[in-house]
Image: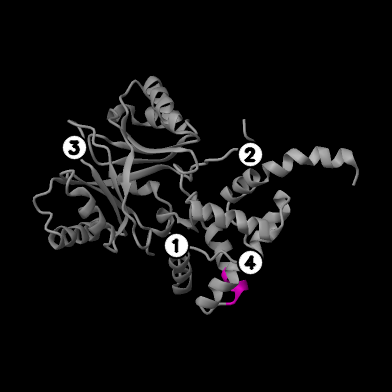
Amino acid sequence: MSARRHWPEPAELDAVDRGIVNRLQNGLPLVESPYAAVAAELSLSEGELLYRLERLLEAGVLSRFGPMYHAERLGGGLTLAALEVPEADFERITALVNAFPEVAHNYRREHRLNMWFVLATETPERIGEVIAAIEAATGLAVFNMPKQEEFHVRLHLPV
Amino acid sequence: MNGLTSTATAPRMSASPQRLRSLLEAGLPLTERPWRTLAGQCGMSEDEVLAWVERWQREGLIKRLGLVVRHHALGIRANAMVVWDLPDTAVAEVGRRLAAEPAVTLCYRRRRCPPAWPYNLFCMIHGTRRERVLTVLDAIVERHGLQDVPHRVLFSLKAYKQCGGRYTRETQP
């Protein structure tokens, strides 16, 4: 499988790390000492929790820690978009698409629509402008699939 | 403190909430009193910072204080986007049921792009192995009687970019 070499080696998480990650995906209490509160729930010292969180951030297991914004209510725009990219041109198109700062995620997937990316913009109107700019840069039609309804999941990614 | 100084700081005072939001995008500091750390950086008191964040949570600007897990770093390599073509009258009910499945980590109704893309319900299933994700999906299809609903599984082959979106600017235009 040639795609495999692109993935980094997985980080080692012990049971305590997993407990921390799963607990914090449900949110941090809004109190003066939130880490002490969570540490107490997990039967850890505050120092150990902070140490482990630092290590998880350094290892790249956590990419972001803090508030999860609701982009639309902040006045921003958010959408999922896809392209049908000719195989031979995939690398060039990837570079063109990723050069847009509004592209937050970009995945290659198994389908005729083989490039999938998230666009996050400061205003909803900007989404249309960025899509037009991506179409102009790549010469490909962008399939725009904005969210119409979100169904809430209990835990975002159990580890 | 003289008059000149207070005049100079006046515009910054009104810009504080914006500054706080911008600082928060970088993440919550890993200190014993993280809100006090932020307060010092944006010229507010700790209570004011807590009040602003409480208000943003109440208004729904902040969904929750949590974290983003980079699943690749954990060896969770089989990231499947499962898409369904459901009648508009059934999509909300099925969406709610799929979201309640422990294996489903995201579930959205999205706009169809017919004829090339007829699907209107998207959900994500992560797993360490592709076969396991497919086994989980089979069980979900069975449990909810979705055998006759057209659906597709799009596994990710490679992540080219994974970063959080930035929604605020340091200064307003």
Of circles 4 and 1, which is in front?
A: 4
Q: Chain of mark 3?
A: B
How crowded is the residue under tag 3: few (<14 C-alpha within 10 Å), some, or many (20+)? some
Which residue position holds label 1? Answer: A25
Q: CA distance from mark 2 to mark 4?
A: 25 Å
Label drawn at residue B170: 2
What secondary structure is marked by label 4?
Answer: loop
Magenta region includes residue A48 = yes
Q: Nearer the viewer, residue B78 or B141?
A: B141
Q: Is residue A121 above or below residue B88?
A: above
> Label 3 vs label 1: CA separation?
32 Å
Q: Is residue B22 visible?
A: yes
Disc 4 and disc 3: Cα gap in Å?
48 Å
Dot 2 and dot 1 within a common chain: no
SS at mark 3 in the image: loop
On screen, residue A87 versus residue B168, left or right, reads left
Disc 4 + disc 3, Cβ < 8 Å: no
Q: Residue furthest bottom?
A: A43
- Tell me the tag on residue B59: none
